[in-house]
Amino acid sequence: MGNKIQLIDRIRLAFAVSVAKSVTFGVRSLRLGAASVLPGSLARRIEPRLLQLLTQQVKNGVILIAGTNGKTTTSLLLCSILERKGYRVAHNSTGANLENGLMTALLESTNLVGTLNVDYAILEVDENILPKILAPIQPKIILCLNLFRDQLDRYGEVDTISKRWTKVISTLPSQTVVIPNADDPTLSYLGQQLPQKVLFFGLNEPENYLDEIPHAVDSIFCPSCGHSLDYKGVYLSHLGDFHCPKCGFSRSQPVLDSREFPQILVGLYNKYNTLAAASAAIELGVDEATILDTINNFQAAFGRAEELEINGKRVRILLSKNPVGTNETIRVVTQSLDKTTLLVLNDRTPDGTDVSWIWDVDTEKLVERGGTLVVSGDRLYDMALRLRYSEKTPQTHFNLIVEEDLRQAIAIALEHTPDNETLHILPTYSAMLEVREVLTGRKIL
Protein backbone atom coordinates (compact mmCIF):
# COMPACT_ATOMS: atom_id res chain seq x y z
CA MET A 1 0.00 0.00 0.00
CA GLY A 2 0.99 3.65 -0.18
CA ASN A 3 2.49 3.29 -3.69
CA LYS A 4 4.09 6.31 -5.35
CA ILE A 5 2.15 8.03 -8.14
CA GLN A 6 3.77 9.03 -11.45
CA LEU A 7 4.19 12.78 -12.13
CA ILE A 8 1.61 12.96 -14.95
CA ASP A 9 -0.90 11.11 -12.81
CA ARG A 10 -0.14 13.45 -9.93
CA ILE A 11 -0.88 16.50 -12.09
CA ARG A 12 -4.17 15.12 -13.39
CA LEU A 13 -5.11 14.01 -9.89
CA ALA A 14 -4.34 17.44 -8.43
CA PHE A 15 -6.57 19.11 -11.01
CA ALA A 16 -9.39 16.62 -10.38
CA VAL A 17 -9.09 17.18 -6.64
CA SER A 18 -9.20 20.96 -6.99
CA VAL A 19 -12.39 20.74 -9.04
CA ALA A 20 -13.98 18.30 -6.58
CA LYS A 21 -13.16 20.44 -3.56
CA SER A 22 -14.44 23.58 -5.27
CA VAL A 23 -17.74 21.85 -6.09
CA THR A 24 -18.02 20.54 -2.52
CA PHE A 25 -17.49 24.02 -1.12
CA GLY A 26 -20.07 25.51 -3.48
CA VAL A 27 -22.75 22.91 -2.85
CA ARG A 28 -22.38 23.12 0.92
CA SER A 29 -22.12 26.91 1.01
CA LEU A 30 -25.37 27.18 -0.93
CA ARG A 31 -26.94 24.51 1.33
CA LEU A 32 -27.80 22.33 -1.68
CA GLY A 33 -26.85 19.12 0.12
CA ALA A 34 -23.88 17.25 1.55
CA ALA A 35 -22.06 16.89 -1.81
CA SER A 36 -21.52 13.16 -1.31
CA VAL A 37 -21.70 12.13 -4.98
CA LEU A 38 -21.26 15.04 -7.45
CA PRO A 39 -17.62 15.90 -6.60
CA GLY A 40 -16.52 12.33 -7.27
CA SER A 41 -18.47 12.22 -10.51
CA LEU A 42 -16.78 15.36 -11.87
CA ALA A 43 -13.30 14.38 -10.66
CA ARG A 44 -13.67 10.98 -12.30
CA ARG A 45 -14.30 12.63 -15.67
CA ILE A 46 -10.99 14.44 -15.37
CA GLU A 47 -9.05 11.41 -14.09
CA PRO A 48 -10.74 8.07 -14.97
CA ARG A 49 -8.24 6.19 -12.77
CA LEU A 50 -9.18 8.28 -9.75
CA LEU A 51 -10.35 5.38 -7.58
CA GLN A 52 -7.13 3.44 -8.13
CA LEU A 53 -4.87 6.47 -7.62
CA LEU A 54 -6.54 7.33 -4.34
CA THR A 55 -6.85 3.86 -2.81
CA GLN A 56 -3.24 2.91 -3.58
CA GLN A 57 -2.17 5.72 -1.23
CA VAL A 58 -3.97 4.19 1.79
CA LYS A 59 -1.17 3.11 4.15
CA ASN A 60 -2.59 -0.03 5.75
CA GLY A 61 -5.20 -1.03 3.21
CA VAL A 62 -8.81 -0.71 2.08
CA ILE A 63 -11.67 -2.55 3.77
CA LEU A 64 -14.75 -3.13 1.64
CA ILE A 65 -18.11 -3.90 3.21
CA ALA A 66 -20.73 -5.39 0.91
CA GLY A 67 -24.15 -6.95 1.32
CA THR A 68 -27.83 -6.16 1.05
CA ASN A 69 -28.47 -4.98 4.60
CA GLY A 70 -26.26 -3.54 7.34
CA LYS A 71 -23.45 -1.94 5.34
CA THR A 72 -23.71 1.58 6.77
CA THR A 73 -24.01 0.45 10.40
CA THR A 74 -21.19 -2.11 10.12
CA SER A 75 -18.82 0.31 8.40
CA LEU A 76 -19.52 3.02 10.97
CA LEU A 77 -18.86 0.62 13.85
CA LEU A 78 -15.58 -0.59 12.33
CA CYS A 79 -14.56 2.98 11.59
CA SER A 80 -15.31 3.94 15.21
CA ILE A 81 -13.23 1.03 16.50
CA LEU A 82 -10.19 1.95 14.41
CA GLU A 83 -10.46 5.66 15.20
CA ARG A 84 -10.60 4.82 18.90
CA LYS A 85 -7.20 3.18 18.44
CA GLY A 86 -5.88 6.39 16.92
CA TYR A 87 -5.96 5.43 13.25
CA ARG A 88 -6.88 7.95 10.55
CA VAL A 89 -9.74 6.53 8.49
CA ALA A 90 -11.41 7.60 5.24
CA HIS A 91 -15.03 6.48 5.22
CA ASN A 92 -18.12 7.05 3.06
CA SER A 93 -20.18 7.87 6.13
CA THR A 94 -23.21 9.20 4.23
CA GLY A 95 -23.86 5.77 2.72
CA ALA A 96 -23.18 6.87 -0.86
CA ASN A 97 -21.90 3.45 -1.98
CA LEU A 98 -21.69 3.63 -5.77
CA GLU A 99 -18.41 4.50 -7.51
CA ASN A 100 -18.89 8.27 -7.43
CA GLY A 101 -19.76 8.13 -3.74
CA LEU A 102 -16.64 6.09 -2.94
CA MET A 103 -14.42 8.57 -4.77
CA THR A 104 -16.09 11.55 -3.09
CA ALA A 105 -15.46 10.02 0.34
CA LEU A 106 -11.78 9.51 -0.46
CA LEU A 107 -11.46 13.02 -1.89
CA GLU A 108 -12.71 14.40 1.44
CA SER A 109 -9.52 13.14 3.08
CA THR A 110 -7.03 14.41 0.47
CA ASN A 111 -5.07 17.62 0.54
CA LEU A 112 -5.23 20.17 -2.29
CA VAL A 113 -2.82 18.24 -4.52
CA GLY A 114 -4.46 14.84 -4.05
CA THR A 115 -2.31 13.29 -1.33
CA LEU A 116 -4.36 10.90 0.78
CA ASN A 117 -2.80 10.58 4.23
CA VAL A 118 -4.90 7.93 5.99
CA ASP A 119 -4.16 4.59 7.62
CA TYR A 120 -7.30 2.80 6.44
CA ALA A 121 -10.20 3.38 4.04
CA ILE A 122 -13.48 1.75 5.03
CA LEU A 123 -15.89 1.76 2.13
CA GLU A 124 -19.37 0.32 2.10
CA VAL A 125 -20.06 -0.89 -1.42
CA ASP A 126 -23.27 -1.54 -3.32
CA GLU A 127 -23.44 -5.29 -3.92
CA ASN A 128 -23.89 -4.84 -7.66
CA ILE A 129 -20.69 -2.84 -8.23
CA LEU A 130 -18.41 -4.89 -5.94
CA PRO A 131 -17.01 -7.01 -8.81
CA LYS A 132 -16.29 -3.90 -10.86
CA ILE A 133 -14.14 -2.12 -8.27
CA LEU A 134 -12.15 -5.01 -6.82
CA ALA A 135 -9.36 -4.88 -9.42
CA PRO A 136 -8.55 -1.14 -9.09
CA ILE A 137 -8.92 -1.12 -5.30
CA GLN A 138 -7.15 -4.40 -4.38
CA PRO A 139 -8.74 -4.46 -0.89
CA LYS A 140 -7.05 -5.79 2.23
CA ILE A 141 -10.32 -7.13 3.69
CA ILE A 142 -13.74 -7.82 2.17
CA LEU A 143 -16.68 -8.17 4.57
CA CYS A 144 -19.65 -10.02 3.04
CA LEU A 145 -22.65 -9.38 5.26
CA ASN A 146 -25.64 -11.06 3.58
CA LEU A 147 -27.48 -11.41 0.29
CA PHE A 148 -31.23 -10.85 0.14
CA ARG A 149 -33.62 -9.89 -2.62
CA ASP A 150 -33.32 -6.15 -3.04
CA GLN A 151 -34.37 -4.00 -6.01
CA LEU A 152 -34.96 -6.85 -8.47
CA ASP A 153 -35.36 -4.27 -11.24
CA ARG A 154 -31.65 -3.51 -10.81
CA TYR A 155 -29.91 -6.61 -9.48
CA GLY A 156 -31.70 -9.89 -10.13
CA GLU A 157 -31.67 -12.86 -7.78
CA VAL A 158 -29.07 -13.47 -5.08
CA ASP A 159 -27.42 -16.47 -6.77
CA THR A 160 -26.55 -14.29 -9.78
CA ILE A 161 -24.78 -11.78 -7.54
CA SER A 162 -22.95 -14.47 -5.53
CA LYS A 163 -21.59 -16.12 -8.67
CA ARG A 164 -20.21 -12.78 -9.87
CA TRP A 165 -18.67 -12.15 -6.45
CA THR A 166 -17.01 -15.58 -6.35
CA LYS A 167 -15.59 -15.26 -9.85
CA VAL A 168 -13.92 -11.91 -9.22
CA ILE A 169 -12.88 -12.33 -5.57
CA SER A 170 -11.09 -15.59 -6.42
CA THR A 171 -8.73 -13.64 -8.71
CA LEU A 172 -7.50 -11.34 -5.94
CA PRO A 173 -4.09 -11.84 -4.25
CA SER A 174 -3.76 -14.61 -1.67
CA GLN A 175 -3.16 -12.08 1.13
CA THR A 176 -6.70 -10.67 0.71
CA VAL A 177 -8.87 -11.63 3.70
CA VAL A 178 -12.53 -12.42 3.06
CA ILE A 179 -15.00 -12.41 5.99
CA PRO A 180 -18.41 -13.84 5.00
CA ASN A 181 -21.54 -14.53 7.03
CA ALA A 182 -21.48 -18.21 8.02
CA ASP A 183 -25.26 -18.22 8.56
CA ASP A 184 -26.05 -17.21 4.98
CA PRO A 185 -25.89 -20.39 2.85
CA THR A 186 -24.90 -18.48 -0.27
CA LEU A 187 -22.04 -16.65 1.44
CA SER A 188 -20.97 -19.64 3.48
CA TYR A 189 -20.59 -21.59 0.25
CA LEU A 190 -18.82 -18.66 -1.39
CA GLY A 191 -16.25 -18.60 1.40
CA GLN A 192 -15.66 -22.33 1.12
CA GLN A 193 -14.77 -21.96 -2.59
CA LEU A 194 -12.18 -19.18 -2.26
CA PRO A 195 -8.39 -19.67 -2.28
CA GLN A 196 -7.79 -16.66 -0.02
CA LYS A 197 -7.80 -16.56 3.78
CA VAL A 198 -11.44 -16.78 4.85
CA LEU A 199 -12.85 -16.03 8.31
CA PHE A 200 -16.53 -16.52 9.07
CA PHE A 201 -18.83 -14.68 11.49
CA GLY A 202 -22.25 -15.81 12.69
CA LEU A 203 -24.56 -16.48 15.62
CA ASN A 204 -24.52 -19.45 17.96
CA GLU A 205 -27.60 -18.50 19.98
CA PRO A 206 -30.35 -21.08 19.33
CA GLU A 207 -32.58 -19.40 21.91
CA ASN A 208 -33.05 -16.66 19.28
CA TYR A 209 -34.30 -19.00 16.55
CA LEU A 210 -37.58 -17.93 14.94
CA ASP A 211 -40.62 -20.13 15.48
CA GLU A 212 -40.81 -20.74 11.73
CA ILE A 213 -39.07 -19.82 8.49
CA PRO A 214 -40.45 -16.42 7.35
CA HIS A 215 -42.41 -15.96 4.14
CA ALA A 216 -39.73 -13.58 2.81
CA VAL A 217 -37.02 -16.21 2.52
CA ASP A 218 -34.52 -16.18 -0.33
CA SER A 219 -32.08 -19.05 -0.22
CA ILE A 220 -33.18 -22.31 1.41
CA PHE A 221 -31.68 -24.51 -1.31
CA CYS A 222 -28.17 -25.88 -1.29
CA PRO A 223 -25.86 -23.63 -3.37
CA SER A 224 -23.76 -26.69 -4.17
CA CYS A 225 -26.32 -29.26 -5.40
CA GLY A 226 -29.70 -27.49 -5.34
CA HIS A 227 -31.33 -29.80 -2.78
CA SER A 228 -33.48 -28.32 0.00
CA LEU A 229 -31.45 -27.42 3.06
CA ASP A 230 -32.30 -28.77 6.50
CA TYR A 231 -32.29 -26.14 9.25
CA LYS A 232 -31.82 -26.62 12.98
CA GLY A 233 -33.21 -23.11 13.20
CA VAL A 234 -33.28 -19.69 11.51
CA TYR A 235 -32.48 -16.28 12.99
CA LEU A 236 -33.92 -14.17 10.19
CA SER A 237 -34.95 -14.95 6.63
CA HIS A 238 -32.64 -17.78 5.47
CA LEU A 239 -29.86 -17.03 7.97
CA GLY A 240 -29.40 -19.87 10.41
CA ASP A 241 -27.80 -23.24 11.17
CA PHE A 242 -28.18 -25.45 8.09
CA HIS A 243 -26.83 -28.48 6.29
CA CYS A 244 -27.58 -30.29 3.05
CA PRO A 245 -28.72 -33.91 3.53
CA LYS A 246 -27.76 -34.75 -0.07
CA CYS A 247 -24.21 -33.46 -0.64
CA GLY A 248 -23.07 -32.71 2.91
CA PHE A 249 -22.60 -28.95 2.50
CA SER A 250 -23.09 -27.25 5.87
CA ARG A 251 -22.70 -24.01 7.73
CA SER A 252 -19.14 -22.82 8.23
CA GLN A 253 -17.71 -22.35 11.71
CA PRO A 254 -17.52 -18.71 12.93
CA VAL A 255 -14.24 -17.49 14.39
CA LEU A 256 -15.94 -15.66 17.27
CA ASP A 257 -18.40 -16.84 19.91
CA SER A 258 -21.35 -14.48 19.43
CA ARG A 259 -22.34 -14.81 23.10
CA GLU A 260 -19.14 -13.04 24.14
CA PHE A 261 -20.11 -9.84 22.33
CA PRO A 262 -22.95 -7.46 23.11
CA GLN A 263 -24.78 -5.91 20.20
CA ILE A 264 -25.21 -2.38 18.98
CA LEU A 265 -28.64 -0.77 18.72
CA VAL A 266 -31.90 -2.73 18.51
CA GLY A 267 -32.83 -5.82 16.48
CA LEU A 268 -31.07 -9.15 16.08
CA TYR A 269 -29.83 -8.06 12.63
CA ASN A 270 -27.56 -5.60 14.40
CA LYS A 271 -25.88 -8.49 16.23
CA TYR A 272 -24.67 -9.64 12.81
CA ASN A 273 -23.36 -6.15 12.09
CA THR A 274 -21.57 -6.15 15.44
CA LEU A 275 -19.91 -9.52 14.83
CA ALA A 276 -18.85 -8.58 11.30
CA ALA A 277 -17.09 -5.42 12.46
CA ALA A 278 -15.55 -7.18 15.47
CA SER A 279 -14.18 -10.01 13.28
CA ALA A 280 -12.52 -7.50 10.95
CA ALA A 281 -11.13 -5.44 13.84
CA ILE A 282 -9.58 -8.49 15.50
CA GLU A 283 -8.01 -9.51 12.19
CA LEU A 284 -6.47 -6.01 12.06
CA GLY A 285 -4.96 -6.52 15.50
CA VAL A 286 -7.35 -4.45 17.61
CA ASP A 287 -7.67 -5.62 21.22
CA GLU A 288 -11.01 -6.95 22.45
CA ALA A 289 -11.30 -4.32 25.21
CA THR A 290 -11.32 -1.50 22.64
CA ILE A 291 -13.89 -3.33 20.52
CA LEU A 292 -16.24 -3.90 23.47
CA ASP A 293 -15.90 -0.32 24.67
CA THR A 294 -16.74 0.99 21.19
CA ILE A 295 -19.76 -1.30 20.92
CA ASN A 296 -21.08 -0.12 24.28
CA ASN A 297 -20.77 3.54 23.29
CA PHE A 298 -21.89 3.28 19.68
CA GLN A 299 -24.16 5.92 18.14
CA ALA A 300 -26.45 4.99 15.22
CA ALA A 301 -25.82 6.11 11.67
CA PHE A 302 -28.54 8.33 10.25
CA GLY A 303 -31.75 6.43 9.57
CA ARG A 304 -30.46 3.13 10.96
CA ALA A 305 -32.19 2.82 14.34
CA GLU A 306 -31.35 6.49 14.77
CA GLU A 307 -33.20 8.11 17.65
CA LEU A 308 -34.22 11.77 17.73
CA GLU A 309 -36.23 13.95 20.05
CA ILE A 310 -38.82 16.04 18.21
CA ASN A 311 -41.16 18.39 20.09
CA GLY A 312 -40.37 16.54 23.30
CA LYS A 313 -41.23 13.13 21.81
CA ARG A 314 -38.93 10.24 20.94
CA VAL A 315 -38.63 9.21 17.29
CA ARG A 316 -36.79 6.13 16.01
CA ILE A 317 -36.04 5.80 12.26
CA LEU A 318 -35.69 2.24 10.99
CA LEU A 319 -34.66 2.04 7.33
CA SER A 320 -36.94 -0.53 5.63
CA LYS A 321 -36.07 -1.11 1.98
CA ASN A 322 -36.65 -4.81 1.26
CA PRO A 323 -38.66 -7.77 2.63
CA VAL A 324 -36.07 -9.10 5.08
CA GLY A 325 -35.06 -5.70 6.42
CA THR A 326 -38.66 -4.61 6.83
CA ASN A 327 -39.61 -7.83 8.60
CA GLU A 328 -36.81 -7.22 11.06
CA THR A 329 -37.83 -3.62 11.71
CA ILE A 330 -41.41 -4.81 12.21
CA ARG A 331 -40.08 -7.32 14.74
CA VAL A 332 -38.43 -4.43 16.61
CA VAL A 333 -41.67 -2.43 16.56
CA THR A 334 -43.91 -5.30 17.69
CA GLN A 335 -41.57 -6.18 20.55
CA SER A 336 -42.02 -2.68 21.93
CA LEU A 337 -45.07 -1.28 23.70
CA ASP A 338 -45.27 1.66 21.30
CA LYS A 339 -48.47 1.78 19.25
CA THR A 340 -47.85 4.44 16.58
CA THR A 341 -45.93 3.67 13.39
CA LEU A 342 -45.32 5.74 10.24
CA LEU A 343 -44.57 3.82 7.03
CA VAL A 344 -43.17 5.81 4.09
CA LEU A 345 -42.91 3.96 0.76
CA ASN A 346 -41.14 5.51 -2.25
CA ASP A 347 -40.28 3.93 -5.60
CA ARG A 348 -37.42 6.12 -6.80
CA THR A 349 -34.12 4.85 -8.18
CA PRO A 350 -32.40 4.52 -4.75
CA ASP A 351 -35.39 2.52 -3.47
CA GLY A 352 -35.99 0.32 -6.51
CA THR A 353 -38.92 1.07 -8.81
CA ASP A 354 -40.63 -2.29 -8.19
CA VAL A 355 -42.56 -2.13 -4.91
CA SER A 356 -44.14 -5.57 -5.23
CA TRP A 357 -41.76 -6.66 -2.45
CA ILE A 358 -44.16 -5.25 0.15
CA TRP A 359 -46.38 -8.31 -0.41
CA ASP A 360 -43.56 -10.46 0.95
CA VAL A 361 -43.44 -8.45 4.17
CA ASP A 362 -45.18 -9.81 7.27
CA THR A 363 -47.30 -6.71 7.79
CA GLU A 364 -49.94 -8.93 9.42
CA LYS A 365 -47.87 -8.80 12.63
CA LEU A 366 -47.98 -5.01 12.60
CA VAL A 367 -51.73 -4.93 11.99
CA GLU A 368 -52.56 -7.60 14.58
CA ARG A 369 -51.15 -5.57 17.44
CA GLY A 370 -53.49 -2.66 16.68
CA GLY A 371 -52.59 0.95 17.33
CA THR A 372 -52.20 3.69 14.71
CA LEU A 373 -50.51 3.15 11.36
CA VAL A 374 -49.85 6.28 9.30
CA VAL A 375 -48.90 5.80 5.65
CA SER A 376 -47.21 8.26 3.28
CA GLY A 377 -44.74 8.39 0.38
CA ASP A 378 -44.94 8.14 -3.40
CA ARG A 379 -46.65 4.73 -3.22
CA LEU A 380 -48.71 5.27 -0.09
CA TYR A 381 -51.83 3.69 -1.57
CA ASP A 382 -49.92 0.49 -2.38
CA MET A 383 -48.84 0.30 1.25
CA ALA A 384 -52.30 1.16 2.53
CA LEU A 385 -53.77 -1.65 0.41
CA ARG A 386 -51.15 -4.08 1.73
CA LEU A 387 -52.09 -3.17 5.30
CA ARG A 388 -55.80 -3.62 4.61
CA TYR A 389 -55.12 -7.07 3.16
CA SER A 390 -53.22 -7.86 6.36
CA GLU A 391 -56.42 -7.91 8.39
CA LYS A 392 -56.91 -11.61 9.11
CA THR A 393 -60.37 -11.25 10.64
CA PRO A 394 -63.10 -8.60 10.61
CA GLN A 395 -62.38 -8.15 14.31
CA THR A 396 -58.85 -6.89 13.64
CA HIS A 397 -58.82 -3.29 14.78
CA PHE A 398 -56.20 -0.72 13.89
CA ASN A 399 -56.32 2.94 13.00
CA LEU A 400 -55.09 3.47 9.43
CA ILE A 401 -54.34 7.04 8.35
CA VAL A 402 -53.33 7.77 4.75
CA GLU A 403 -51.67 11.14 4.18
CA GLU A 404 -50.02 12.20 0.90
CA ASP A 405 -48.12 15.15 2.35
CA LEU A 406 -45.11 13.75 4.21
CA ARG A 407 -44.68 16.72 6.52
CA GLN A 408 -48.32 16.48 7.51
CA ALA A 409 -48.04 12.69 7.92
CA ILE A 410 -45.15 13.14 10.35
CA ALA A 411 -47.13 15.75 12.28
CA ILE A 412 -50.14 13.42 12.50
CA ALA A 413 -47.98 10.50 13.64
CA LEU A 414 -46.35 12.64 16.33
CA GLU A 415 -49.76 13.83 17.47
CA HIS A 416 -50.90 10.21 17.93
CA THR A 417 -47.76 9.28 19.87
CA PRO A 418 -48.15 9.60 23.66
CA ASP A 419 -45.39 11.43 25.52
CA ASN A 420 -44.15 8.21 27.13
CA GLU A 421 -43.92 6.25 23.86
CA THR A 422 -41.68 6.25 20.77
CA LEU A 423 -42.82 6.96 17.23
CA HIS A 424 -41.30 4.37 14.90
CA ILE A 425 -40.80 5.51 11.30
CA LEU A 426 -40.18 2.81 8.66
CA PRO A 427 -39.08 4.52 5.41
CA THR A 428 -37.44 3.32 2.21
CA TYR A 429 -34.08 4.92 1.38
CA SER A 430 -35.14 8.12 -0.40
CA ALA A 431 -38.04 8.44 2.01
CA MET A 432 -35.60 8.22 4.92
CA LEU A 433 -33.68 11.19 3.56
CA GLU A 434 -36.90 13.18 3.22
CA VAL A 435 -38.03 12.23 6.71
CA ARG A 436 -34.72 13.34 8.20
CA GLU A 437 -34.86 16.60 6.26
CA VAL A 438 -38.25 17.33 7.76
CA LEU A 439 -37.22 16.29 11.26
CA THR A 440 -33.79 17.91 11.39
CA GLY A 441 -34.14 20.71 8.84
CA ARG A 442 -31.20 19.60 6.71
CA LYS A 443 -30.55 17.25 3.81
CA ILE A 444 -28.11 14.36 3.84
CA LEU A 445 -27.29 14.26 0.11
Image (tube, grey):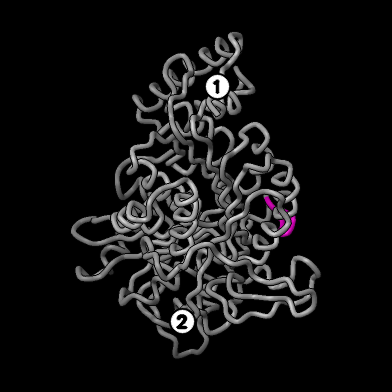
> Which residue is drawn at the image coordinates 55% and 9% (left, top)?
11
Picture quadrant of residue 274:
bottom left
> Which residue is drawn at the image coordinates 59% and 39% (left, top)?
139
Q: Residues within 10 Å of mark 1 (few under 14, many from 20)?
A: many
Assign a secondary structure to mark 1.
helix
Visible in this render: residue 129? no
- In this picture, residue 25 sits left or right of residue 107: left
**Residue 77 in the image: above or below residue 328:** above
On residue 43, the disc is 1
Mark 2 lies on residue:
207
The residue segment tinted magenta is: 155-160
Q: Residues within 10 Å of mark 2 (few under 14, many from 20)?
A: few
Picture quadrant of residue 268:
bottom left
The x, y position of residue 87, in whole percent, is 38, 36
The x, y position of residue 259, in whole percent, is 42, 71
On residue 179, the disc is none
Quadrant the N terminus occupies = top right
Q: Nearer the viewer, residue 312 or 159?
A: 159
